[in-house]
Image (cartoon, rainbow, N blue to C red):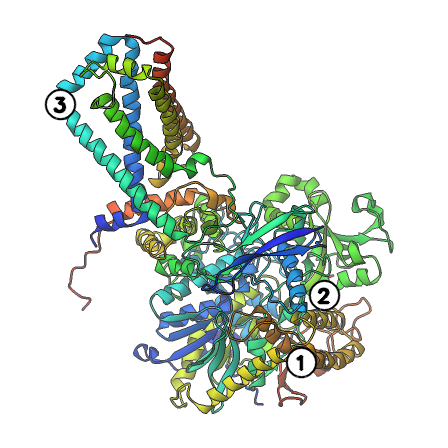
Amino acid sequence: MELNAKVPSGPIEKSWDKHRFDLKLVNPANKRKYNIIVVGTGLAGGAAAASLGELGYNVLAFCYQDSPRRAHSIAAQGGINAAKNYQNDGDSVWRLFYDTVKGGDYRAREHNVYRLAQVSVNIIDQCVAQGVPFAREYGGQLANRSFGGAQVSRTFYARGQTGQQLLIGAYQAMERMVGLGKVKQFTRHEMLDLVVIDGRARGIITRDMVTGKIERFIADAVVLATGGYGNNFYLSTNAKGCNVTATYRAYKKGAGFANPCFTQIHPTCIPVAGDHQSKLTLMSESLRNDGRIWVPKDKGDKRAPGQIPEDGRDYYLERRYPSFGNLVPRDVASRAAKAVCDEGRGVGPGGLGVYLDFSDAVKRIGAAGVAEKYGNLFQMYEKITGEDPYSVPMRIYPAVHYTMGGLWVDYNLQSTIPGLFVLGEANFSDHGANRLGASALMQGLADGYFVIPYTIGDYLARGGWEKTTTDHAEFKKVEDDVTGRIKKLLGVKGKRSPDSFHKELGKLMWDNCGMGRNAKGLQENLKRIPALREEFWKNVNVTGEAGELNQQLEKAGRVADFLEFGEVICMDALDRDESCGGHFREEHQTEEGEAKRDDEKFMHVSVWEHQGEGKAPVRHKEPLKFEYVKPAQRSYK
Amino acid sequence: MSWTLKFWDSTVGKKVLMALTGAAGFVFVIGHMAGNMQVYLGRDQINAYAHFLHEKAGLLWVVRIALLAAVGLHVLSALQLQLIKRAARPVRYQKPGIIQATPASRTMIFTGLLLAWFLLYHLAHFTWGNAHPAFRELDAYNNIVTGFQHVPSSVFYIVCMVLLGLHLGHGGNALFFSLGLVHPKYRQAVRAITYALMLLVVIANISIPVAVLAGVLKI
Amino acid sequence: MRIILHVWRQKNAQSPGKFERYERPEVSPDMSFLEMLDVLNEDLVNKNEQPVVFDHDCREGICGACGFVVNGIAHGPEDGTTVCQLHMRKFKDGDELYLEPWRAKAFPLVRDLLVDRSALDRIIQAGGYITAPTGTSVDANNILVAKPDQERAMDAAACIGCGACVAACPNASAMLFTSAKVTHLGNLPQGQPERLDRVEAMVATMDKEGFGSCTLIGECSAACPKSISMDSIARLNGDYIRATFVKRPLELSGQGSG
């Protein structure tokens, strides 16, 4: 597998400009001759579909939801970063670039990150022009807030619904193109496989989730913007429908999968309430601006939080990280919470929780002041837990939130399969081993609005593939695979529901490949996941039929892929014998329990190549060079 | 399609027409009520008022035609919208529920149709006289008193005035929404004034049959 | 606690539907409503029966995918809440609950509690956007927005497109949905150039899709999980009147651009 990142030469500040000039163009009249498939309609996919349609390409956009507006980008709360320096506090493209590379624990590709910081300013302009109602100052200018891992105020926000507003902006732009006939929208269509002809991505096979019809779609290029695979852990902050199928199928067709073990655990989620729990809900990182995190000093202290006096409390983040305090980056905060719970000092049912206490803030600015800042979040917390966070401290616990790993892409966002482009959370490129808050929205929109419209033109202009139709033998073969697989799933007729397998897999992943990982646990998973997979194919019970709306069948197909992909995650986690960012190998920590990188051996992207059914994948390396930001031990003390 | 037809064809345009014609109707019933109140000033006063209206026959007919057109448009729009609304929910809820909507707001079509029927009766009763037991042309005082001495007629009038109140209470407020005339500064005031006017019309109108039955107004 | 469910089961739009009774003996008050249905479905699968089909995705009350009617109330009895955020502690032991899909001609039933809401997408396609192709924008702070305008726009933009307004309206009207978008974009300076064309096009599509008309009874706003205000409907009406009576038609000189 050749991993040519195609990073432009010359100074990093000029590289994107230079690269854009070097890219070939498709003349305006010719654009209408090209078809592009876009799978996923979140920030990255929606923005790409709209922008490509505006350029004149014929876009076919697919999503599994009933409307493009429901993609899970919508759930992002806090905000979006941009190096606008509107606060005059010393921000710059360079600083955003620096913070992101450092926050990612030096495992991201410098040139991609620099470009991301550069186009961040255009994103805000674009979104405002579309009518995104960002928060404003009284003078009418845009307002900003601060987020973890940064010392400037560069986060733009729309109440606690920034993701929603940005997505609605992209969705409206896309719907405009649907109205004009440049984008064809296929909702409730799930991509089940990729079609590669003569080494190039040429189409997809989908299942119409209402009728069950399997369909073939052909195009000149395929764009995947299908999000992350956090649901491999069953419980996560992802939407219930989020899945790995599109990217995993592409991987099985030859696309390299990069850093699958880089998963982000978000420190502030509402803890699990019982076995029935179906998903976890995030409480925005912004709460850590005013809330103080603590646990009882003594093991097994079962007193109500109000009964524990000040000297019986351990504000462990403030104690361990006096300068960043409660605002340390996500990976650090999550691990610290796990550590105190492992010591037996966790609170709430099962001892899996820590307090996020607003009583000091209520004393300082009053309950009304707290409500003005966080009212909607407090309301959401109360709805879910039935507890009033103004009087009782919130209980929070870390949960799987985001996956930095994804399909490997070069500087043009093209995967190792020519003609297959990957955007947003589905690719791997910008966040390294840990993503900073408010950067996911930035990356999704950067890829969709400002990168893919240029780079896909270069691919199309170079041409080199033959015209063909969906009658091509390869389309038939892949479609047969897909229908065969569905038949197989329905034919097992075992005793266990797809969900029960998913839950069991999720527990294995969380226990042995979650916040803390070690060789023993990972090796155990590498035995137990294949065994579970085997049981799945013998004992799963998928009710209903193929030719109807069948949510059990949808679920089963996704779980089948998670059962394979979980193994790849664990392999990568075992292979990366160092700690970095969200990947914490317990064997590699400093005396204070911080992640200890091994730059000597692991300053690379691990890219996994599928070798065929039943064969172990091969790991390739893309070495990372840090010419502009010198790697150092991250310190937030 | 011409812009006027397009407006008429849209549900929003029809609602605007209903608001405008409804507003005209509201203004009319206030004026009508004020005119009726002269019955308390004695036979001569109200009969003089009736004569005065008749002398201005030209003006009277302009007003009558305008009102007839307003009522016609109001009813036509309402009926057309009713068909659209029914078609919009072909399958009804088996277990319906309501959160906050007032009975008045949910029964506009029924109160409206009953009022339309009442209007015909009212005209036959006091204008054409063919539904009146002892109608005397231009002797309004006599017609009112003898008309309301018939108890079933009075009860029917009182019931219809309550219906009118329900209809005006919702319609009088809703018309401001339909015309886009909503502003947080004036919201309370508009509401208060609409309800006050509605109550005034209803109470004042009901007072007449009550006064007749109580013997306050007599021949 | 014990809950008795009567769930609307209908295989597809063509076949007839009916309520099916399910007894749930052990419901935890910490469950969300959908988690309660998850457990029911798990039991049904284990008994080799067809699980209840309902739409859902984020389960955080923001994607707008979920929604059905509980005892006649869209999204159930709690104010300002989607059914995925409705928790069972809101109910009491022995409650009997009737679950029905959104019922409207414009929302054809697909299966059980799941309906087709693509009509809402088509209303947006008609004009629920600001034409701002990628790359055409000026610096963000060149467009100043007064704070009250921005707040009003945001209040309306909070709409999640779930369709509860249509479901709750006795007339199955989509006025609250449509007017929320008109209000969001119409309150912003960026939305002014297309403001009157937008409202005309969106209303025309709304009518064409078969939604009913608005009688201003306010059930939509009361059922709305984001509590979108009825004022947005007034705003739409006002803009529609302006579009009809004030807007000048486009007069092209016929000179061409050369």
Q: Share a chain, discs 3 and 2?
A: no
Q: Which mark is residue A276?
A: none
Q: Who comes first in sequence, dot 2 or dot 1?
A: 1
Element under disc 2: loop
Tell me where residue B146 appears, x and y as whole percent.
Answer: 28, 14
Q: Is residue A97 above or below residue C229?
A: below
- The kind of residue on which mark 3 rests is Ala
Q: Which mark is residue B57?
A: 3
Q: Residue under label 1, please give it.
A: A537
Q: Nearer the viewer, residue A52 or B120?
A: B120
Residue that appears at 31% across and 41% down: B78
Q: CA distance from mark 2 to mark 1?
A: 47 Å
The C terminus of chain A: image quadrant: bottom right
Tell me where residue A48 appears, x and y as whole percent.
Answer: 45, 71
Evaluate whether residue A154 shows in this view: no
Side of A497 where B29 appears, left or right: left
Tell me where residue A110 appears, x and y as whole percent.
Answer: 58, 75
* Chain letter belonging to callout 3: B
Element under disc 3: helix
Element under disc 1: helix
Q: Is residue C106 above or below residue B172?
A: below
Label 3 packing within 10 angstroms: few (<14), some (14-19), many (20+):
few
Image quarter of residue A588: bottom right
Image quarter of residue A269: bottom right
Tell me where residue B51 appears, x and y as whole percent.
Answer: 17, 15
Q: CA distance from mark 1 to mark 3?
A: 92 Å
The N terminus of chain A: image quadrant: bottom right
- The kind of residue on which mark 2 rests is Ser
Q: Residue under label 2, please give it.
A: A635
* Chain letter belonging to callout 1: A
Q: Residue furthest front?
A: B133
Q: Nearer the viewer, residue A164 or A340?
A: A164
